[in-house]
């Protein structure tokens, strides 16, 4: 029932995967809803400068790589591909346009009002957008995140020498030598794009392994795979400064622990050392909300902040910075606002790195499970022994199932495989239903599929895979 004290029942700040989904669900529940967005288009980081353009370029560059020296040659197909980077970029832009336009269509269809501009709080029920005050019974903060800067390394996306992910998605030439600072998800995905298109790529990573947060075996495998693909890895190193001119960039690099300083010359640099929540300019002080030491807004299990009428979701709150996590929180938050119970199981949020092969996980790593007090049993199955991977000649990787030794319940699944991002969905569903490794092992999987490797890894938990 609409409350006429306010302009809207629900006002969402930010139209990324968290915000636009929350707005649509709130409207579907019959609440009068508006969404404020400061960008020209809807969809947030994910659709405009994140998930979608990066996946488009990963796909285009993968096709080029396959033709240039990858599987085409393996299968006796000779091709000498040439690259029209402008066409590749245009196709990416087209995909972005179609998807951001799609959200605009969904807003119209669901009667969500799109308010263009930057929102700042006036009080717990009102925000100021470009000098106009808009009021709502409930306000959802879904302002997302942006790039963490690195002192001494000034990002200038316009000059296109030292760029962040947004700049790396719009380079007008293939870098001769791209130095990637940070061997996490963005560095490896966008580093892969440019390596495939012909750049020499050097990854400078502070830690002694790539992909922090992932399982130790996965991280070790990542190091081997990216090295094999031709990336130069400088693990346990940090960049201490970078100077750009019209021709290139000169970087100073030293060991993470200090010492052994050296200078590296590069044509381009990508800074990808993490992202931080967007709260600047929201005037949170006017409603008495402070951020935690990570800059995030703290919430309860129902996504409500310490202010009753103010809620928060997505990258701006604790948890992994992932689009699907933000989306699920958007739905659940809108349901809580409507007096229902929204559900997000934060223990079962899959994560995928969309390189080739892909790296995917869900649940606990082996180390985290042990630290949580479990006695674990691990089952591992190499893609080398999976018949479909073998037939396709894409045998890099493995599946690892971590189960509770006492109950056999699956605690985590870790996959390195060309189709890991697709395969992980089965593991997530199984874990959501509290599956044991035996449940997965005794589920019939179609043959020949990559998914059979998950079944065999589950069989390996109790020691009886067939094909190994
Ligand atoms: P955002 O998508 O950041 O949206 C927040 C929106 O709020 C923005 O549009 C911003 O303009 C707007 N805003 C901020 N402040 C205000 C204000 N005061 N007033 C009005 N509007 C405001 N995640 C995945 O799951 N899979 C991927 O493949 C993936 N790839 C990525 C690739 C890259 C290069 C990057 C950078 C990120 C990627 N991510 C990926 C992460 C994903 O984009 C984020 O987790 C997701 O977008 C977070 O959604 P959100 O709604 O919380 O915030
Ligand atoms: P990240 O946290 O994944 O990786 C950052 C890396 O930089 C870490 O390995 C860290 O050790 C390293 N690092 C930090 N400071 C450093 C320094 N001074 N020198 C060298 N290395 C340093 O962050 P990234 O890649 O920027 O991505 C940000 C977020 O975006 C991720 O948390 C992820 O959730 C999201 N994202 C998700 C994608 C996906 O789901 N496929 C794709 C891209 C981004």
Image (tube, rainbow, N blue to C red):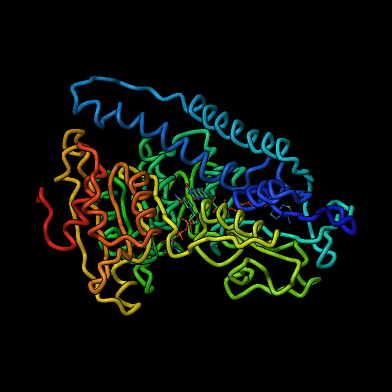
| Residue 218, horizontal then vertical, whole percent | 28, 58
- Location of residue 160 by image quarter: top right
Q: How many marks?
A: 0
Image side of residue 221 versus residue 353, left or right: left
Image side of residue 1 versus residue 312, left or right: right
- The quarter in which the N terminus is drawn is bottom right
| Residue 435, horizontal then vertical, whole percent | 32, 60
Residue 301 makes an appearance in the image: yes
- Location of residue 78 by image quarter: top left
| Residue 361, horizontal then vertical, whole percent | 36, 56
Q: Between 285 and 406, which is closer to the camera in this rendering?
A: 406
Residue 162 makes an appearance in the image: no
Image side of residue 316 versus residue 218, left or right: right
Q: Which residue is at 73% across, 48% downward?
A: 37
Q: Between 305 and 68, which is closer to the camera in this rendering?
A: 305
Q: Between 56 and 115, which is closer to the camera in this rendering?
A: 115
Q: Which residue is at 37% across, 46% downward?
A: 421
Q: Which residue is at 81% across, 61% downward?
A: 137
| Residue 429, horizontal then vertical, whole percent | 38, 53
Q: Between 361 and 393, which is closer to the camera in this rendering?
A: 361
407 in relation to 93, above or below:
below
Residue that lies at the very extreme toward the bottom in this rendered image? 373
């Amino acid at each position: 029932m609409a409350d006429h004290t306010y302009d809207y029942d629900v006002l969402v700040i930010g139209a990324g995967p968290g915000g636009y989904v929350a707005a649509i669900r709130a409207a579907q529940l019959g609440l009068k809803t508006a969404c404020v967005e400061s960008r020209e288009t809807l969809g947030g980081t994910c659709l405009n400068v994140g998930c979608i353009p990066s996946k488009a370029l990963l796909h285009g560059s993968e096709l080029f790589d396959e033709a240039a020296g990858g599987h085409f040659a393996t299968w006796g197909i000779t091709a000498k591909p040439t690259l029209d980077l402008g066409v590749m970029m245009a196709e990416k832009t087209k995909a972005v346009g179609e998807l951001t336009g799609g959200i605009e269509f969904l807003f119209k269809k669901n009667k969500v009002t799109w308010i263009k501009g930057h929102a700042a709080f006036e009080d717990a029920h009102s925000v100021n957008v470009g000098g106009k005050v808009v009021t709502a019974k409930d306000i959802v903060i879904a302002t997302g995140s942006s790039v963490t800067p690195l002192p001494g390394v000034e990002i200038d996306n316009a000059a296109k020498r030292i760029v962040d992910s947004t700049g790396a998605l719009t380079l007008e030439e293939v870098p001769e030598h791209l130095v990637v600072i940070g061997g996490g998800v963005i560095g490896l995905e966008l580093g892969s794009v440019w390596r495939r298109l012909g750049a020499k790529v050097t990854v400078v990573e502070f830690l002694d392994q790539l992909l922090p947060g992932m399982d130790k075996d996965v991280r070790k495998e990542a190091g081997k795979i990216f090295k094999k693909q031709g990336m130069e890895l400088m693990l346990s190193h940090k960049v201490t400064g970078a100077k750009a001119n019209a021709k290139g960039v000169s970087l100073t690099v030293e060991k993470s622990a200090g010492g052994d300083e050296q200078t590296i010359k590069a044509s381009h640099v990508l800074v990808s050392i993490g992202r931080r929540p967007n709260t600047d300019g929201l005037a949170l002080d006017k409603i008495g909300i402070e951020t935690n030491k990570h800059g995030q807004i703290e919430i309860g299990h129902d996504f409500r902040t310490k202010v009753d009428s103010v809620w928060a979701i997505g990258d701006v709150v604790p948890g992994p910075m992932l689009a699907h996590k933000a989306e699920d929180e958007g739905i659940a938050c809108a349901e809580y606002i409507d007096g229902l119970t929204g559900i997000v199981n934060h223990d079962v949020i899959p994560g995928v790195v969309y390189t080739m092969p892909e790296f995917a996980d869900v649940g606990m790593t082996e180390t985290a499970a042990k630290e949580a007090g479990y006695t674990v049993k691990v089952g591992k199955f190499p893609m080398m022994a999976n018949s479909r991977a073998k037939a396709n000649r894409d045998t890099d990787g493995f599946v690892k199932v971590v189960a509770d030794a006492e109950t056999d319940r699956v605690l985590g699944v870790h996959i390195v495989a060309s189709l890991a991002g697709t395969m992980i969905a089965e593991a997530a569903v199984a874990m959501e239903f509290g599956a044991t490794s035996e449940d997965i092992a005794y589920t019939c999987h179609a043959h020949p599929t990559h998914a059979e490797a998950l079944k065999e890894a589950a069989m390996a938990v109790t020691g009886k895979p067939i094909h190994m």
